[in-house]
Image (cartoon, helix red, strand yellow):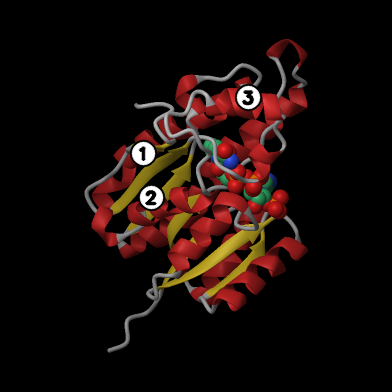
Amino acid sequence: MVQKKKVALVTGASRGIGQAIAKELAMDESLTVIGTATTEDGASSISHYFAKWGLDGDGIKMDVSDPSSVEEGVKQVTSAYGPPLILVNNAGITRDGLLLRMKEADWNDVIDTNLGSIYRVSKAVLKGMMKERWGRIVNVSSVVGQMGNAGQVNYCASKAGIEGLSRSLAKEISGRGITVNCVAPGFIDTSMTSELTDDVKESMLSTIPMKRLGEPSEIASVVGFLASKQASYVTGETIHVNGGMFMG
Ligand code: NAP
């Protein structure tokens, strides 16, 4: 009998870490991977890269900070492919600045996009996972969620919040065969870090024992493990992937 493919949903898959995660998961032939972007152009770029790689996946438009967009997106995926049984909450933004100068909108946008999204998208896919009595939720936090970082109170609060949310949700649903874990990247070579000045990059590198930025694929392989059957007894955990910069 041919086994039905599982559906994996990866938010923020248009580039960077999300794109690498989408590729890593789609290399597993038992999965159909749906990646999200905030625009139609971004969604079709995701569909194109899956086609170019010869992997089973598609792109959809979804704004994780908008409840109706999330509801609509999850509905669309479920009716076209089936309920997502693997969710990778990867989408995230920065709006850096010292607290004294930080605008309310910069605080709210980061908390809502990075943390509110985990509440929103996880809730939208949970019913399907509970029905199946199997699921994997992997949330992308950050090394600075535990270390703290001047100029990023909003971002660090959102990332620390993700880890607390994940441990609590793991306690709520692990009895149903659904695991919830985090991967906390260090400094990874993506558009998020390419915006940093050379000075900032150099001072960052001096704190990393491996003396280099990480590659998106180095985050993706750990996410791939947590999303796999092999990770069946790992839940409520945060795995740090940071070249030794912080050892939790
Ligand atoms: P990136 O290159 O800036 O990509 C961000 C992704 O998030 C894009 O696909 C973007 O979609 C999506 N996104 C942004 N706002 C969204 C929204 N409202 N709704 C849906 N999608 C949205 O970032 P990255 O470096 O790959 O980071 C990915 C994750 O890793 C983030 O959670 C980030 O905080 C975390 N992280 C990164 C680093 C690092 O050093 N790079 C370190 C620690 C943690 P569009 O293309 O449509 O804008």
* Viewer-proximal residue among 47 and 244: 244
Q: Residue 175 appears at what percent x and percent y?
A: 24, 48
Give the quadrant of the C terminus.
top left
Give the amino acid at mark 2.
Val
* Residue at left offset 49%, top offset 37%: 141
Classed neighbour count for the residue bearing mark 2: other residues with Cα under 10 Å, few (<14), some (14–19), many (≥20): some
Residue 51 visible: yes
Give the quadrant of the N terminus.
bottom left
Classed neighbour count for the residue bearing mark 3: other residues with Cα under 10 Å, few (<14), some (14–19), many (≥20): many
In the current view of this chain or complex, which residue is farthest to the bottom?
1
Q: Residue 55 appears at what percent x and percent y?
A: 51, 76
Give the amino acid at mark 1.
Ile
Q: Which residue is mark 1?
A: 239
Give the amino acid at mark 3.
Asn
Classed neighbour count for the residue bearing mark 1: other residues with Cα under 10 Å, few (<14), some (14–19), many (≥20): many
- Assign a secondary structure to mark 1: strand
Q: Which residue is mark 3?
A: 154
Q: Which residue is mark 2?
A: 222
Label 2, label 3: how far apart the Cα atoms are = 26 Å
Residue 116 visible: no
Q: Residue 6 appears at what percent x and percent y?
A: 40, 70
